[in-house]
Amino acid sequence: MKKEEFRDNETLEQLKEGGANVFVATIDSVINWGRKNSLWPLTFATSCCGIEMMATGAPRHDFARFGMEVYRASPRQADVIVVAGTITNKMAPVLQRLYEQMSEPKYVVAMGACAISGGPFYLNSYNVVKGVEHVIPVDVFVPGCPPRPESLLYAMLQLQRKIETESMKSRKKRSQSHNSI
């Protein structure tokens, strides 16, 4: 996707202004290239957003062209968890355990209104978590109820851009802050 088609290029430029030397910057760019082009998402769909997540992997939208077609059922083989749907208080410890079992670096995408804010179920229910960020740290949010497959695809491309700007130092700091939650 062309750089001009993204709406937030200023933030990307600010992230790149870290000031690393040439050797470390070259190693970072090679590592980040490999990581961003081989994302393996974990299937974690609890509601209607799961249908849209499946549609994103179908031939019409085709995750495969961006290197993220292999949906995993085991957290030990995945590095991205796409939380699609409502998270209840009973489900929160399970989600946190799955997140802890994922290998580093690990990323989280919150898909849909239920995962982001509890959705329409939060107001009249005592057992719905008001956003998955209260359980695990979230890297990218996908708004909508349910969001279209194009929205999830755009979010995954944004996650790839975020991975592209990481450095060794920022990865270490990020993993320490994510482990403290």
Image (cartoon, helix red, strand yellow):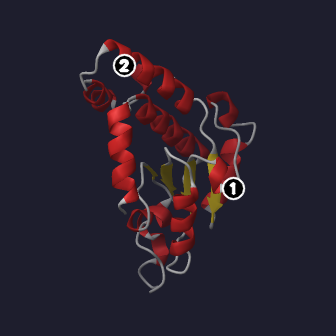
Q: Nearer the viewer, residue 84 or 40?
A: 40
Identify the disc placed on residue 74: 1
Q: Amino acid at mark 1?
A: Ser
Report crowding for label 1: few under 14, some 14 to 19, many 20 or more residues within 10 A (C-alpha).
few
Rendered location of residue 112, percent (x, y): 51, 58
Q: Is residue 41 above or below residue 74?
A: above
Which quadrant is home to the C terminus? bottom left
Quadrant of the rendered structure where residue 73 is?
A: bottom right
Q: In the image, what residue occupies the spot 33% across and 29% down? A: 12
Report crowding for label 2: few under 14, some 14 to 19, many 20 or more residues within 10 A (C-alpha).
some
Answer with left or right where residue 158 lies relative to residue 84: left
Q: Nearer the viewer, residue 34 or 88?
A: 34
Q: Secondary structure at mark 1?
A: loop
Quadrant of the rendered structure where residue 169 is?
A: top left
Q: Nearer the viewer, residue 110 or 176?
A: 176
Q: Amino acid at mark 2?
A: Ala
Rendered location of residue 67, percent (x, y): 64, 31
The residue that label 2 is drawn on is 25
Is residue 31 shown to the viewer in this render? Answer: yes
Rendered location of residue 33, percent (x, y): 52, 24
Q: Secondary structure at mark 2?
A: helix
Circles 2 and 1, Cβ within 8 Å, touching? The answer is no
Answer with left or right where residue 167 lies relative to residue 43: left
Is residue 7 shown to the viewer in this render? Answer: no
Alpha-carbon distance for marks 2 and 1? 33 Å
Q: Is residue 96 above or below residue 7?
A: below
Answer with left or right where residue 98 lies relative to residue 139: right
Name the outermost residue toward the right: 59
Identify the disc placed on residue 39: none
Q: In the image, what residue occupies the spot 30% across and 25% down? A: 16
